[in-house]
Amino acid sequence: MRKFFLPILGLLLTLLTGCWQSVIFDEKITGPYRLSAIDISEQMSVCYELKGKDSCVGRIEETVFSVGWSEQFIVAKQHPSNDRSVTNYFIIDIQKDAELLDPSESVTGPLTEAEYQEKSKSMSLPAFSRTLEDLR
């Protein structure tokens, strides 16, 4: 009896742990794009919401702390894995993106600040308009 009880208990604990995950932050950016964090704010990322499903696929991983957008682009600043000594810049070309597209097809980055500034001038990128101060 004990042989069967322990694996079942392990499975139940795994399922219950998954159920306790909660989205602590979820904000629409534009179109299907969301700024979202599960469990802790340091997991903040930009994701693409799947149609008809309660899920999102990643575009820019944690820790995103600032975004801006226009009809053509989303720009983001990110501290990789919440390392605040490093700031990466990303550009999502909305026109090239699609629900299940590999992000490498539509996301440019990580870029340094100098690389980003150069692209910003030539591409007329939007300003950063939403900053999460506690993650800055």
Image: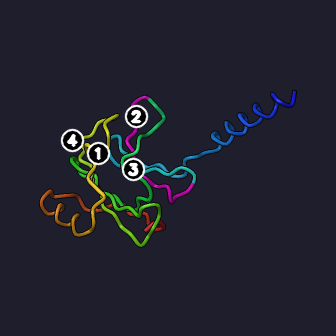
Q: Quadrant of residue 58?
A: top left
Q: Are marks 2 and 3 in contact (CB under 8 Å)?
A: no
* Outermost residue, left side: 122
Outermost residue on the front side: it is 3
Tell me the crowding category of disc 2: few under 14, some 14 to 19, or many 20 or more residues within 10 angstroms, Cα based. some
Nearer-the-camera pick, 124 or 88:
88
Residue located beneath label 3 in the image = 46
Asked if 36 appears above or below 130 in the picture, the reply is above
Q: Residue at x 21, y 41 (%)?
A: 95
The mark closer to the camera, 4 or 1, is 1
Q: Residue at x 34, y 34 (%)?
A: 100
Q: Which residue is mark 4?
A: 95
**Mark 2 = which residue?**
50
Q: Is residue 44 magenta?
A: yes
Which span of residues is magenta-colored? 40-52
**The disc labelled 3 sits on which kind of residue?**
Val
Q: Are marks 4 and 3 in contact (CB under 8 Å)?
A: no
Callout 4 secondary element: helix
Label 1 is placed on what type of residue?
A: Ser
Residue 51 locus on image (x, y percent): 39, 31
Rendered residue at 23%/63% (across/down): 116
